[in-house]
Amino acid sequence: MTTIVDKISSVSGVPPQIVWVLGIVFCAIVAGSVIRIGSMLITKPIDAKSKERLGSLGVWWGLFFLLTTVVALGPYAVVILFAIISMAGLREYRQLVSRRQGISPTSWVFVVAIIHYGIVAAAKLGPFWTLIPVWVLAALLVQLVIGEETKNFLEIAGTVYLGLMLLVYMISHAALMVTMPLVPRGQGAGPMGLLVYLVLLTESNDIAQALWGRRFGRHKITPRVSPGKTWEGFLLGAATTVSLAILLAKPLTPFATSPLHVEGYSVAIPYLPAVIAGLLIAVAGFFGDVTFSAIKREVGVKDSGSLLPGQGGILDRIDSLTFTAPAFFYFVYIFCREGV
C-alpha cells in the first residue's frame, strides 16, 4: 500500500500524507455508497426519498473528485475553483434576495469577485483586506447616492454588501491559505494540507451535527431560525469534529508538535492547536449554517436552489465554509504561523 501511495504522490506531486487521507475518505465514501445502495435495493419499490439520497450520494462523489483534482493541480486551481464557487453562490444569492421587495444585487458584483480572486492568486494581503471591506463598500454607497436610490437604500446596500462579504471575501480565505503559505512544505503536508484539513473538518462537522441531532436532539438552540439545530447535535458534533481534528493533525498539519504563540509566549502542548482548531471549526460551522438558514427563512424558502441533487443549492453546501474558512485562516495566521 505504501508503494502505491508513493507512486501516486510522485506522479501527482501531492504529498503522500494527503494521498493517504484522501484514500481513507475514498474508502469511506465507497462504504457509504454500498450501504446506501444496498438498503435501497432491499427496500422496494424505490421511492422519491431514495432517489434523493442517491442524488446526494452522487454529489458527494463529485465533490470528492473535485477536491482531489484541484489538490493535484495546485494553488491556482484552488483559486479558480473557489472563484467559480463564489460566482455560483452570488448567482444563487441574487435569485434568493430578489424575492424580497424586488431587491437584486447588480451584475458588477461578479466583476468584483474576479478582481478579488486575482488578488488572492497574487497573495497581496493589503488589497485583500481592503478591496471589498473598504473600497467596494464606498463605491456601492456612492453609486446608490449618485443614482438617487433613496427607496430601499439600506436594504439594497446591506443586501449587496452582505453577499459580497459572505460569498466572496470570507470564503476566499480558504484559497488564500494555499497561495499565501502559512506553513512551509515539510510541515505537516504544507499549505495544501491545511486546506484539506479545513474542508474535511467543515464537511464532517456538518454531517456529524446533523446525524447526532437527528438521533439524540431534544433541546433546540435556534427554534425560529433553524428548528433542526439542537444542543445535543451541536455538542456531540463538536466532540466528533475535535476528535477528527486530532486524528488528522499529524498527517496534514504541524498541529501535533508545533507550539501555540500567545503574546510572545509559546505554549508547547502536543495537539493543543488541533483541539482549538476543531472547536473553532465546530462553532464557526454552526453559525455559518444558521446564518444562511436565517437568510432563507427571510425570503421564505427551504433550500437555496436545486443545483445539487439531494442537497439543495450551492449555498446549502458552502454555508458553513463561509465562516470556518476565515476563522481557521486567522487562527493559523495569528497563533501558529511563527512556530512553523
Image (cartoon, grey):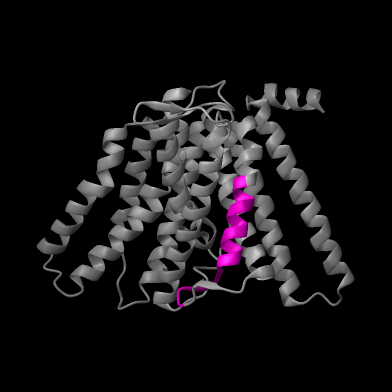
Q: Residue 273 appears at what percent x and percent y?
A: 52, 36
* Whether residue 143 is situated above or below residue 274 in the rendered picture: below
The front one of 90 and 302 is 302
- 269 relative to 240 in the view: left or right: left
The front one of 8 and 283 is 283
Residue 36: image quadrant is bottom right
Q: Residue 285 appears at what percent x and percent y?
A: 50, 55
- 108 relative to 168 in the view: left or right: left
Residue at (16% x, 58% y) in the render: 141
* Region in magenta: 224-242
* Whether residue 299 is situated above or below residue 159 in the rendered picture: below
- 104 relative to 27 in the view: left or right: left
Residue at (43% x, 26% y) in the render: 266
Please name the predominant secondary structure of the magenta segment in the image.
helix
Residue at (54% x, 58% y) in the render: 317
Residue 231 sits inside the magenta stretch: yes
* Whether residue 335 is situated above or below residue 170 in the rendered picture: above
On the question of residue 331 being in view, the answer is: yes
